[in-house]
Image: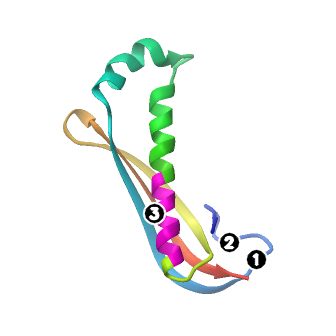
Amino acid sequence: MELTTTPSIEGRHITRYCGIVAGEAVLGANVFKDMFAGIRDLVGGRSGTYEKELRKARQIALDELSEQASELGANAVVGIDLDYEVLGEKNGMLMVTASGTAVVVA
């Protein structure tokens, strides 16, 4: 499955549009990760723990998007948009959504 944020794939022709697809991932922030992120994980203004969780959530969302596209008979998804939100009481949840257009390219 080819995935891209661009509206087309250079050198490939879209032969069929299959529909809009989306994938979501909602992950809870671990209390201990939150408490110690500022102390042990902050290096040069970055938190490795949060970056790892963001990567994990993004991959889950993209995997769901790919699975949905495959079920529609697509072999690519173009125009992918990724959105990140915090949810829940005290912003204790992280949500990543990925959406795009499932297509068949030749």
Q: How is the image coloured?
A: rainbow
Residue 94 pos. (x, y %): 35, 42
Q: Foreground mark, 3 or 2?
A: 3
Q: Disc 3, disc 2: CB below 8 Å?
A: no
Compared with 69, 62 (above or below) is above
Q: Is 46 colored magenta in this rendering?
A: no
Q: Is residue 60 visible?
A: yes
Residue at screen point 50% across, 35% down: 52
Disc 2: which residue: 8
For the residue marked with disc 3, what is the amino acid?
Answer: Glu
Q: Earlier in the sequence, mark 3 or mark 2?
A: 2
Residue at screen point 48% across, 44% down: 56
The region drawn magenta spans 60-70
Residue 85 pos. (x, y %): 36, 46
Q: Is residue 90 left or right of residue 34?
A: left
Disc 3: which residue: 64
Neighbor class of circle 3 (other Cα within 10 Å; few <14, some 14-19, many 20+) is: some
Q: Disc 1, disc 2: CB below 8 Å?
A: yes
Q: Earlier in the sequence, mark 3 or mark 1?
A: 1
Disc 1: which residue: 12
Residue at screen point 77% across, 70% down: 10
Residue 29 pos. (x, y %): 32, 34
Q: Secondary structure at mark 1?
A: loop
Q: Is residue 99 visible?
A: no
